[in-house]
Amino acid sequence: MLGVGGLLDTLGFPFNRLIIKLGFIQMKKSLPENKIGQYTPEDARKLVEFIFLENSDPQNIYSELAEKVMPKFMKGTDEEKEWARRQLLGRSSEAVMTVGLINHYQIIYTAEKQYASLILEITRKIEKEHECTTAVEKILAEQIAMAHIKIIDYSRRFEEWCSSPQSSKVEITKFLEMLGRQIDKANRQLHTAIIVLRQIKQPALSVNINTKNIFTAQNQQINDNSQKT
């Protein structure tokens, strides 16, 4: 008979990547006390959400840190603090990604290392200038920064290939054509993201109609006396 791990592997869920929580006390609090056979599909969905929690889910990361690591890190013995420190370092990459829309560290890996500080600086300045607070606005700030870095990098490569002697003119021409297309594409991405962000941040147009200033001539007779002598 298959165990839980074998069953999950059969269904396509790697057992080592899932946290199985069987806290029946908390589960009962979130589900109504119905009789057997009277639970709804929505109740079943809540049960599945509670039991199967992906290891990289931010909710799971924070729960594990709060319940197991932080108490020992803050008030534990020296050995417990060292254990907690290793646990934090072991999950540091996942923990950092959970606040990616705050620190934007994930976009560093979209460009060469030499552009790391620049791409972060551009993103944060755009956020400040446009007062980006929502997830969509922050994502657009990242897209603007990434597109700008692409333009810089592709333009640098274009100039390097133009100024350096190469053996095959055919290869040079093809490569420069490819770089030109990439520069154009990055420019379109940059302009589109800027336009969308400005449209989102633009205050809504307010139109007030004062009915007292509206005059109608319905059912009114207009006499023209200009031709009378």
Image: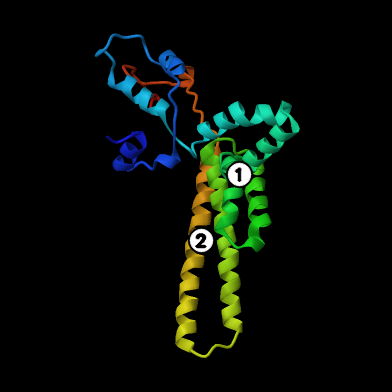
Q: Give the residue furthest to the left.
A: 37
Residue 30, picture quadrant: top left
Image position, residue 221 (x, y; %): 33, 18
Residue at 66% x, 63% y: name it. 114
User: Where is 185 relative to 133, above or below?
Assistant: below
Image position, residue 15 (x, y; %): 40, 40
Q: Quadrant of the N terminus?
A: top left
According to the image, label 2 marks what residue? 186
Image position, residue 154 (x, y; %): 55, 68
Mark 1 and mark 2 lie on one chain; the one further toward the N terminus is 1
According to the image, label 1 marks what residue? 90
The amino acid on which the numbered mark 1 sits, given as a three-letter code, is Gly
Q: Which mark is residue 49?
A: none
Residue 3, picture quadrant: top left
Dot 1: element: helix
Q: Give the residue furthest to the right.
A: 78
Name the one closer to the observer, 220 or 160. Answer: 160
Dot 2: element: helix
Name the one closer to the observer, 25 or 93. Answer: 25
